Image (cartoon, rainbow, N blue to C red):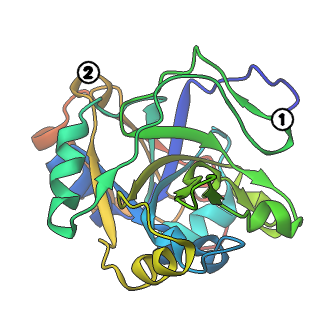
Amino acid sequence: MDNEFYKPSYLYQYTTIGSLALILKTRSIKFNSLAYVDDLEEMKSGDIDEIGRYVFASCWTDKKEENIALWNMYAEKMRGIRIGLPVYSLEDSKDFVQRQVNKYKLNLIEYGSETVILPDNTYVWKDFKWANYYQLREIMYTDDDRKLFPNIIRTDDEGNIQLDSLQLGLCKRKCWEFQQEWRYLIYIGLNSNNKKDTLYRVYKKKKVPESLFARIDAKQFEKMTVLMGPGTNESDYVIVDALKEKFNPTMTIEKSYFSEKIFV
């Protein structure tokens, strides 16, 4: 960002009408493990290959202007929709997320609300709201492998291990820059003081969920916008109108600028 103090007011996610139905019914947003995002390199760090399985991301963009590539990739080749929600729309409810990981004998990692210095001296400022369990980050695009695959193992004088997981899920290669991505992140992990070799084996074999869900705040939920994809037809509008009436009557529905302007 040219303006390091920039904060978006809305974030947007391109998805399918089926996913919209589930979001509206459950009033929740899905977070995928980095093992199940489109860029499989994100699962790796410089010292633990699959540690990204413990990081969960919900991916958005701050650009109100429509992105044809995102329409094609994530919205059923333009027949889906784009959700808009105010920034920081997730409930500050750690227990809701913790219950989902309890059966895996894992824990949410909490970092508090202090300013954290990130790669390249980018910052998360104190006036950015942090919930107990999730954080919001703007993705940095780079081809520097040291930033793409940071070493996260930290060892104290007694040989105990700590993992600096906060470095994960922040960077992607420049070839992904068209996504102009912001993401909410949830970090989970084990409470462990194992030595490095033992810790590696534990994290390698431990089962983790493929996805987690976080609830949308009720007042922010009412401010949701839905942009119909360029390839949507009359029956798609009927479905989305019905979903609005049943689950979110204050939601606004808009037509794509590209509707009837491009071949779908």
Look at the picture and state if 257 lies above or below 158.
above
Residue type, numbered disc 2: Lys
Q: Of the residues tagged 1 and 2, which is closer to the observer?
A: 1
The residue beneath circle 2 is 219
Mark 1 or mark 2: name the one nearer the start of the chain.
1
Of residue 43 and residue 196, the one placed in the foreground of this image is 196
Residue type, numbered disc 1: Asn
**For numbered disc 2, what is the local secondary structure?**
helix
Of residue 251 and residue 44, the one placed in the foreground of this image is 44
Q: Is residue 18 left or right of residue 59?
A: left
Of residue 224 and residue 51, the one placed in the foreground of this image is 51
| Quadrant for the N terminus in the image | top right
The residue beneath circle 1 is 121
Residue at point 86% right, 42% down?
Answer: 120
Residue at point 52% right, 43% down?
Answer: 12
Instruction: Please rate how many residues cluster around mark 2, counting C-alpha atoms within 10 Å: few if below 14, some from 14 to 19, many from 20.
Output: few
Residue at point 69% right, 57% down?
Answer: 179
Give residue 156's position: percent from left, percent from top. Answer: 61, 52
Residue 86: image quadrant is top left
**3D distance between C-alphas at marks 1 and 2:** 34 Å
**For numbered disc 1, what is the local secondary structure?**
helix
Give residue 19's position: percent from left, percent from top. Answer: 31, 62
Furthest residue to the front?
Answer: 158
Disc sitting over residue 130 in the figure: none
Residue 242 can be seen in this image:
no
Residue at point 54% right, 78% down?
Answer: 50
Furthest residue to the top?
Answer: 127
| Quadrant for the C terminus in the image | bottom right
Residue 244: image quadrant is top left
- Whether residues under marks 1 and 2 lie with C-beta atoms below 8 angstroms apart, the answer is no
